Amino acid sequence: MGVLPGLGPVAAISLLLPATFHVPPVSSIIMLSGIYYGAMYGGSITSILVNIPGEAASVVTCFDGYQIARKGRAGPGRPSMLKSLMMACIGVVIGNIGLDLITAQPRFTFGLDILLDGVGLVPKD
């Protein structure tokens, strides 16, 4: 939706809101947030490639993104696949620290009670 000029994330959510009426609330919120972030990302595609912002939030992307695209650097560079896979594996391991959701057995806590809640994104006191 964000690729179409004038139809931003708010329009996408309002058009697809009736599709969530018979879905559980948590699933519908997850679906609507995915639509929102997808539309926000889609707006940057048109602003970078053709210098037309998809929505108001991607106007600033037109200033630098289009100039970079004209130089032939619009797509991502070739990052190391090994580094990407290593970071994904580390993320999965860190995400598994804590109690198992089904059996409530501790995983990767090494006997430390502080790790039973998992690893938080914000440090605590």
Image (cartoon, rainbow, N blue to C red):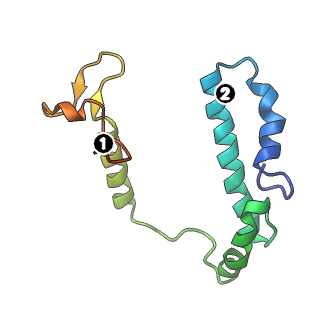
Q: Residue at x 32, y 53 (%)?
A: 86
Q: Are marks 1 and 2 in contact (CB under 8 Å)?
A: no
Q: Residue at x 85, y 59 (%)?
A: 5
> Type of residue at label 1?
Ile
Is residue 116 rendered to the left or right of residue 15? left
Identify the element where label 2 is drawn: helix
Q: Which residue is outermost to the right?
A: 6
Is residue 14 rendered to the left or right of residue 35? right
Q: Image quadrant of residue 73?
A: bottom right
Q: Which residue is outermost to the left?
A: 111
Q: Which residue matches tag 2?
A: 28
Q: Earlier in the sequence, mark 1 or mark 2?
A: 2
Q: Position of residue 88 (x, y in %)?
A: 37, 49
- Crowding around mark 1 (Cα neighbors within 10 Å: few <14, some 14 to 19, many 20+) is some
- Crowding around mark 2 (Cα neighbors within 10 Å: few <14, some 14 to 19, many 20+) is some
Is residue 82 rendered to the left or right of residue 22? left
Q: Which residue matches tag 1?
A: 94
Quadrant including the C terminus: top left
Q: Image quadrant of residue 33?
A: top right
Q: Is residue 3 visible?
A: yes
Identify the element where label 1 is drawn: helix
Residue 118, numbered label: none
Q: Residue at x 64, y 22 (%)?
A: 25
**Image vertical order of residue 9 relative to residue 110, above or below:** below
Name the one closer to the observer, 116 or 124.
124
